[in-house]
């Protein structure tokens, strides 16, 4: 879910034509929300802060929270964050962790959400007790670029097949190579490319790669972190093992 809109009327009910008008505007509003969220995907600095831990009771009340988690909560783009101790997005991930538990007590639920200062935050939740209505541990930490790449592509509204074509284009595959890899005709690949260009707002493969480059690689290069010989960026620029994907892995 990219966002939601609640419209209330103090008296009487909405007329059918009014409901139809909102339904017509829905896709346009969704498109605007996705593009607005997409603008926050570019991170201008490397986060070094530790992950934060939140412990929720069975009723979602706050049992404990670390200082880092409190800082990350302040980064959430959630209208409920100012009025409740635990923002709705956090309890939603906790509910998902409880709902996903069957015989496995360490089931993990995750969500990627935009941050106020730019970039993305990952929220992971896991049930602590065997009871599906029990306590949940929630971890908040900055999302790595490989995790965000799929969100960036999804923000353009690409279908699963269009995402696969985009991935292969970023790898430098030709139309014929993409067709062979996907077991479709070259004409089908061209149809997918046309749809991708329309959704992303570009006119060529080169512009498509450049658009995703600006989202994924440019911020790293601005920070003085060059890509290595293997096509990956070092997260620290000092040759350490913490690395993030370059555009070829987007």
Image: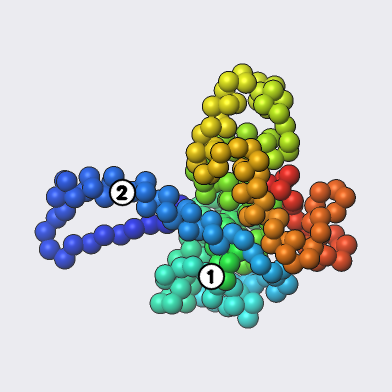
Q: Where on the picture, by quarter, is residue 40?
A: bottom right
Q: Which residue is mark 1?
A: 116
- Mark 2 and mark 1 lie on one chain; the one further toward the N terminus is 2
Q: Where on the picture, by quarter, is residue 181?
A: top right
* Few, some or many residues within 10 Å of mark 1 (<14, 14–19, 20+): some
Q: Residue at x 64, y 64 (%)?
A: 43
Residue 79 at x, y = what percent? 42, 70
Left or right: 128 with respect to 83? right
Q: Residue at x 40, y 77 (%)?
A: 83
Q: What is the total number of numbered labels drawn onto the structure image? A: 2
Q: Residue at x 88, y 50 (%)?
A: 229
Q: Is residue 61 above or below residue 125?
A: below
The reply to whether dot 2 and dot 1 touch (C-beta < 8 Å) is no
Left or right: 53 with respect to 17? right
Element at badge 2?
A: helix
Q: Is residue 13 above or below residue 156?
A: below
| Cα separation between marks 2 and 1 | 26 Å
Left or right: 190 with respect to 2? right
* Few, some or many residues within 10 Å of mark 2 (<14, 14–19, 20+): few
Residue extending farthest bottom: 67
Element at badge 1?
A: loop
């Amino acid at each position: 879910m990219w966002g939601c809109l609640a419209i209330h009327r103090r008296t009487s009910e909405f007329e059918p034509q009014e409901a139809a008008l909102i339904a017509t505007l829905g896709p346009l509003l969704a498109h605007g929300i996705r593009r607005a969220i997409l603008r926050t995907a570019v991170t201008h600095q490397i986060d070094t802060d530790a992950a934060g831990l939140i412990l929720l009771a069975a009723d979602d009340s706050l049992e404990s929270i670390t200082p880092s988690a409190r800082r990350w909560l302040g980064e959430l783009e959630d209208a409920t964050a100012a009025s409740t101790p635990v923002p709705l997005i956090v309890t939603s991930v906790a509910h998902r962790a409880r709902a996903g538990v069957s015989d496995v007590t360490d089931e993990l639920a995750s969500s990627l959400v935009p941050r106020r200062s730019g970039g993305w935050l990952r929220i992971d939740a896991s049930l602590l007790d065997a009871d599906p209505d029990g306590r949940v541990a929630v971890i908040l930490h900055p999302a790595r670029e490989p995790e965000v790449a799929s969100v960036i592509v999804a923000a353009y509204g690409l279908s699963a097949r269009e995402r696969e074509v985009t991935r292969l284009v970023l790898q430098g595959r030709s139309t014929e190579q993409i067709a062979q890899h996907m077991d479709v005709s070259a004409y089908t690949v061209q149809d997918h490319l046309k749809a991708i260009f329309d959704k992303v707002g570009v006119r060529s493969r080169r512009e498509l790669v450049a658009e995703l480059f600006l989202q994924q690689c440019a911020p790293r290069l601005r920070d003085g972190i060059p890509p290595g010989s293997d096509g990956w960026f070092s997260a620290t620029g000092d040759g350490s093992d913490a690395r993030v994907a370059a555009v070829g892995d987007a």
